[in-house]
Amino acid sequence: MDEVTALEERRTSNQKLEEIVPRPRSYRVEAVVLRRVDFGEADRVLVLFTRERGKQPVVAKGIRRIASRMAGHLELFTRVDIQLAKGANLDVVTQVDTRDAFRHLREELSRTSTAYYVAELADALTEEGDEHPELFDLLIATLRALETTDDTRLVAAHYTLRLLDVTGFRPVLQRCVVCGADLLPGKNAFSPFLGGAICPRCAPAEPTARPIPSDALKVLRNLQRAGALGSAHFRVPELVMRDVEGTLRDLVERHTERRLRSPDLIARLRVEADPIVRAAPPAVYDPEPDEAQALTPQPQEPALTPRPPLPQAGEGEQVTTIQP
């Protein structure tokens, strides 16, 4: 029996079961708004992640009208209790109550852009209708951590590793993914296609392997062993964090077979906020010579650092100016 025939028989069986035991016309779920798309003149399609039913697209009719009472409750990243009615194609929002608006995420651009990344990963790594209560709790914990943390990049990296673990894509970081030997400090590599780190002996024979710095591998291991979101408190140098983010991005894009959009947005915003910060490195860890030169700190960078203000001279005092 081929797959198409099996699906047709399963659909027919489900329809007969619904005729015998009809499903309720309306139901209530707890959800977080991951994504939204304008539809028609006044409607909007929302992609929710629910505790009870996993990822679920719904339609909110008339939500874009000025008089709509639901618009303020269905903002992105909002945690809501929502009443849904069965629809022909998409279920329809009939009532909604806000449980947590996560307002602080919208007050700072770095927190908002990281929340977009969190939502994009949850959307990309899950299928519609798959129940993931643990992932829902992880999503709520991450949004709460982003509201209070001083290091949104570390929280995002921690969330990515936990999400990969929950969805069954946990990377192998303690031993070689090829031969199983314990990894020692040194010139190890990483393969997003194999899903883990590779020892120096096996790396030359693996075409998808690329070098991973020891410090980046240590950060990934520490985050993988860390507890709840927001519990990891250590400072990561800029270049090491770029390696960590690039490794995780490669891994996610390999599993989802799609390019993530939010990391590029976050990198552009970071550069605009601080001209000294260079753009994040590309996903490939073996850059061309021109790209490697662009990623290497240049000698003139210290000249871009703003000088501290000169001290003000008090009455009867003199200030000596030292020329650079």
Image (spheres, helix red, strand yellow):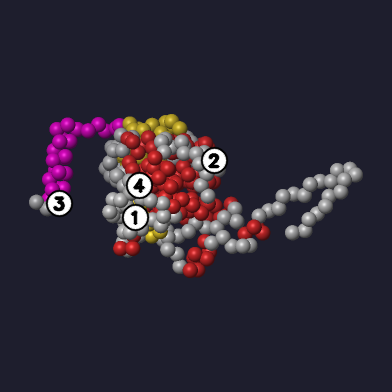
- Report how many numbered discs are placed on residues in the image: 4
Residue 161 position, x and y percent, is 38, 45
Which sits in the foreground, 70 or 139?
139
- First reached walking from the N terminus: tag 2 or tag 1: 2
- First reached walking from the N terminus: tag 4 or tag 3: 3
- First reached walking from the N terminus: tag 1 or tag 3: 3
Q: Which residue is mark 3?
A: 3
Q: Amino acid at mark 1?
A: Ile
Q: Amino acid at mark 2?
A: Asp
In the rendered structure, are the residues bearing label 2 and label 3 in contact, judged by CB atoms less than 8 Å apart? no
Residue 55 position, x and y percent, is 32, 42
- Magenta part of the protein: which range? 4-27
Q: CA distance from mark 2 to mark 3?
A: 50 Å
Instruction: Select label 2 or label 3 by which is in front.
Output: 2
In the rendered structure, are the residues bearing label 1 and label 3 in contact, judged by CB atoms less than 8 Å apart? no
Residue shown at 43%/37% (left/top)?
229
Q: Which residue is mark 4?
A: 174
Instruction: Select label 1 or label 3 by which is in front.
Output: 1
Residue 284 can be seen, yes or no: yes
Residue shown at 37%/35% (left/top)?
137
Q: CA distance from mark 4 to mark 2?
A: 29 Å
Residue 275 position, x and y percent, is 60, 56
- How many other residues sit within 10 Å of disc 2, few (<14), some (14-19) or many (≥20)? few
Q: CA distance from mark 2 to mark 1?
A: 33 Å
Does residue 54 show up magenta in the picture?
no
Q: CA distance from mark 1 to mark 4?
A: 10 Å
Q: Which residue is mark 1?
A: 198
- First reached walking from the N terminus: tag 1 or tag 4: 4
In the rendered structure, are the residues bearing label 2 and label 1 in contact, judged by CB atoms less than 8 Å apart? no
Q: Which residue is mark 2?
A: 150
- First reached walking from the N terminus: tag 4 or tag 2: 2
Instruction: Select label 4 or label 2 by which is in front.
Output: 4
